[in-house]
Image (cartoon, grey):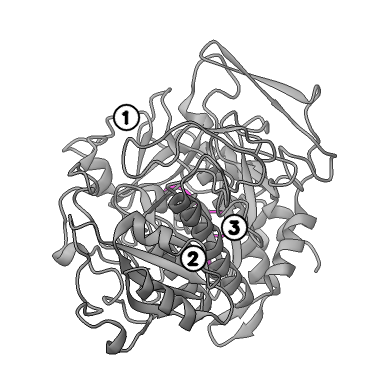
Amino acid sequence: MNRWSKRLAGAATATVITAALTTGTPAGGAAAEGTGLRDYLVFYTHGAQARAVDAIRAGGGVPLSTEPKLGYVIARGPGIRFAEALADNEAVAGISSDRRVGYATSTPATGVNASDIRTLSLPGAEPLAGRQWDMKMIGATAAGSYATAPGDKKVLVGVIDTGIDGKHPDIAPNFNRALSRNFVTDKPKDPNGKEFDGPCEFKGCKDPADWDDDGHGTHVASTIASPINGLGIAGVAPRVSLVNLRAGQDAGVFFLKPSLDALTYAADNGIDVVNMSYYVDPWLFNCKANPRDSTAEQLEQRGIITGMQRALDYAREHGVTLISAIGNEGTDLGKPRADLTSPDYPLDSQRLRKIDNSCLNVPAESKGVISISALGPSGRKASYSDYGIEQTDLSAPGGDGNDGGADPDVTRTVLAAAPEHMLRAKGLIGANGEPRSSSVVRDCHEGTCAYYQYLAGSSMAAPHATGVAAILISRFGKPAKDGLTMPPADVQRLLYATATRKPCPTPRRYAYHTSGDETVHTCEGSTSRNGFYGHGIVNAAKAATTSR
């Protein structure tokens, strides 16, 4: 797969280094498979690009291109030996192979039988609004924020995820196809020959910018901005524009380079706010100098921390508000002790790592990012949601099937749009169009049918906050050539100011009981800021009426 020369129109471009640097290896050549050569992102220190290029060549590598906006060189080198050769060079800030990043996993729920009937509809609301306990919690209802501030189409919301089904009937009216981009190429198999994305559906293994084989990104986008159109549901901000900034594979995981490209593109094309419901792999926690990691592994983790922070800084400096899911490991991110899942790529290479608070979950713990914890329908922090007094900025409904009863209930999770072709491929709907799973709902209106699925995760919580941010930008943003713009610091301040304060539970050591097991999470902090709820629960109704 050629990861650096094939670019979509308008994508962040890399400056090709002169042919003198790439003698014998054309910049457009495919990465050598099975020869020990790998492609790396080599992040250089300030003003040290030339010295970094010299170090790459001295280490037996070949520089291919550079991205001056974020300060890195794409180079090809002979595996771990190449990475370790750069370890002590003062011009190199970090080096990361072009590996995947994974999203905060959303979990299909099981429970009551859901069908395509509209028995839970509410007067004056969308047909499935009665199933949207999440919108009721934050005041995104027909009597709440929809009536006063449904959003402005000039506001551009970027969804960095697995894609958006832009043809979905409950997304299409708000989908900006012209600005949407796909920064990935499908990989049918992983390096070990195991099925990864599966067979390619489109020429060159390049999906269109309105396609989503995973469903995760479509669910996120729907939560943000499904329109009010008499069909299915409505999102938090039902009149804003959705822009697909796809950085995730069909398999639901992400490579680092497309993630950097998506953030850079957002900065350069007037995107107002981005939703990032993912964390950077192959390391759940990135440690700059963990003695239990090899030199090459330490360099890779430094590269992830450095590269993502540079991309996030670039986006924020260009007016992009950054919102992230906090994660689904049920971990106090201020007191992590062990990482059992890293590195998770290549497959089956994970091991037990002792870690501490110097190790970061990226981008949730990156600077300038607003991190969102997940809540169940009772308002308690979801049992799976990560938390932490330093890490949790806000909270929002993400669903918890075990919140409110002894048995799991699908209606306690979050309902949003799902691609029909994905559901058919997974056998979740039959040939006659009827749902085969309680996690799938169908709604039809005037001959048009659409599908929705219940999911739970901090991935589902983050887009609620993103939608509220879009409401604020719609109300207070200033005219710009790309639509509206608002400083991210102002958006953040108003998100915090309009949030509903929620104190720690009593006792602070809260016990969750799931499948007969007890897990205890301890909430630290005050009502104004604590580890479970941050500055509070996002509030669309208050954002729709607050003064600046």
**Residue stretch rendered in magenta on the structure:** 232-242
Can residue 439 be found in the magenta stretch? no
- Badge 1, how many Cα within 10 Å: few under 14, some, many 20+? many
Residue 4: name its quadrant: bottom left
Q: Main secondary structure of the magenta part?
A: loop
**Tag count:** 3
Q: Image quadrant for the C terminus?
A: bottom right
Of helix, strand and loop, which one carries label 2?
strand
Q: Which of the two residues, 513 or 133, is positioned nearer the viewer here?
A: 513
Q: Is residue 47 left or right of residue 537?
A: left
Rendering coords of residue 141 (x, y %):
61, 49
Q: Amino acid at mark 3?
A: Ile
Q: Residue at x 44, y 68 (%)?
A: 42
Mark nearer the viewer, 2 or 1: 2
Q: Is residue 479 left or right of residue 116?
A: right
Q: Which mark is residue 158?
A: 2
Q: Which mark is residue 437?
A: 1
